[in-house]
Amino acid sequence: MAELKYEIVEHIGVISENAKGWTKELNFISWNDRDPKYDIREWAPEHAKMGKGVTLSVDEAAQLKELLSGIDFDSFE
């Protein structure tokens, strides 16, 4: 299997953390020297391992932001 190369261009924030110390994060990542994309996935401490995730282009992230802004999260409590 080919080696996966990545560079976290910008760490935006931690969404959550589980009991084993893995964090679900939003980052801006360049995969295999390509243009960076927004990325949501779980990471082991020190980014030693990663779980499956979702990558979004800038346009997709903007669309997601618009969709999320229309949700009344208080109604789910």
Image (cartoon, grey):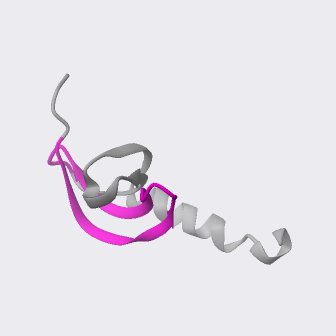
Question: Residue 40 at what x, y percent from top left?
Answer: 44, 55
The stretch of residues the image draws in magenta is: 5-34
- Does 41 appear above or below 70? above
In the rendered image, is residue 42 in sight? Answer: yes
Image quadrant assignment for residue 71: bottom right
- 44 and 24: which one is in front? 44
Image quadrant assignment for residue 8: bottom left
Question: Residue 74 at what x, y percent from top left?
Answer: 80, 77
Magenta stretch holds residue 14: yes
Question: Which quadrant would the C terminus be assigned to in this image?
Answer: bottom right
Question: Residue 27 at what x, y percent from top left?
Answer: 35, 63
Q: Which residue: 31% across, 70% down? A: 11
Q: Residue furthest bottom?
A: 74
Callout count: 0
Q: Residue furthest top?
A: 1
- Does 33 appear above or below 3? below
Question: Which quadrant would the N terminus be assigned to in this image?
Answer: top left
In the rendered image, is residue 56 in sight? Answer: no
- 3 and 33: which one is in front? 3
- 30 and 52: which one is in front? 52
- Is 10 displayed left or right of 25 in the figure? left
- Is 4 displayed left or right of 60 in the figure? left
Q: Which residue: 85% across, 73% down? A: 75
Question: Residue 21 at what x, y percent from top left?
Answer: 42, 59
Image quadrant assignment for residue 38: bottom left
- 19 and 44: which one is in front? 19
- Is 67 displayed left or right of 31 in the figure? right
Q: Residue furthest front?
A: 20
Main SS, magenta region, reads: strand
